[in-house]
Image (tube, rainbow, N blue to C red):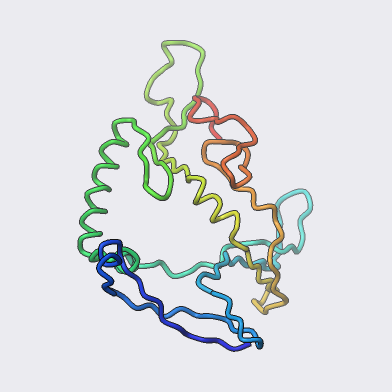
Amino acid sequence: MQTLTVTVEVINRRQRENHEIIKHHPLTFLAEPSGKAERNIKIMAIKVIAQRREVKLGKNPGKKFVIRPDLYSPIQEKKVFAEAATHSGISAGVIKAAWDAAGEVIRTWATEGHSIPLPGLGTMRFGVRSKAVENLEDVKTGLITVRRIIFTPNVEVKDELKNTSIQITCLDEDGNVLKRVTSGDSGDIEDPENTQPSDGGGNQNTQPSGDVPGEGD
């Protein structure tokens, strides 16, 4: 199989009408021997590590493979704005200014108790965890155990996660690679508003629990 690099033209709506080209992007194609090309724009996978180590807690202590995330280096903010500028045709400075303004609005409305839409991502709101008491005189601010930031992804984000493969690298105690496998899990997604995961399409297995006082989950 051969790898071919081609250039595509990215234009916005106004420039499409005027037939103006604003950006050239190289994309990778995988060419079969027959000459047929398959577009290979996004190949993504979540990478995790399963390392064998001594587990001393639990009902069955001993050496077990324990999964942990394969941490990536954080992406800088300016790179996010630069990438968004490439996709939209709007300058990174304008995008940053708009995003900063939106962030201020979101913070203000969230502190007023609103559930705020995050375009393209989902919703965010503030909440609390608290204890439950029987008597009215026992109701006081000390019942609140922790404040929460609750992000609820939209269906598109859930589907993106559900359809993304998970690659597992198995290591021994010394960090030597034993094998690599791709997870065959069902793709169920945990929802912050529920005690059970969703199926990735927005369908929940239980009713929302919300911030019911005394739950503490």
Query: Residue 50 falls in which quadrant of the image?
Result: bottom right
Q: Nearer the viewer, residue 191 or 64?
A: 191
Q: Nearer the viewer, residue 83 or 50?
A: 83
Residue found 48% across the figure and 29% down from its top = 211
Q: Which percent across, then down, holds residue 195?
A: 60, 36
Residue found 76% across the figure and 56% down from its top = 61
Q: Is residue 15 left or right of residue 53?
A: left
Relative to 211, residue 88 above or below: below
Query: Residue 66 falls in which quadrant of the image?
Result: bottom right
Q: Which percent across, then down, holds residue 42?
A: 52, 69
Residue lying at the far right of the rendered structure: 60
Q: Decide if residue 204 is in sight here.
A: yes
Location of the C terminus (image quadrant) = top right
Residue lying at the far top of the rendered structure: 136
Q: Is residue 212 left or right of residue 197?
A: left
Q: Decide if residue 81 is in sight here.
A: no
Relative to 43, residue 61 above or below: above
Q: Which percent across, then down, holds residue 105?
A: 25, 42
Relative to 60, residue 110 above or below: above
Residue found 68% across the figure and 73% down from its top = 171
Q: How many tags in the picture?
A: 0
Q: Which percent across, then down, holds residue 122?
A: 43, 45
Residue found 55% across the figure and 31% down from its top = 208
Q: Is residue 8 left or right of residue 216?
A: left
Q: Nearer the viewer, residue 5 or 35?
A: 35
Location of the N terminus (image quadrant) = bottom right
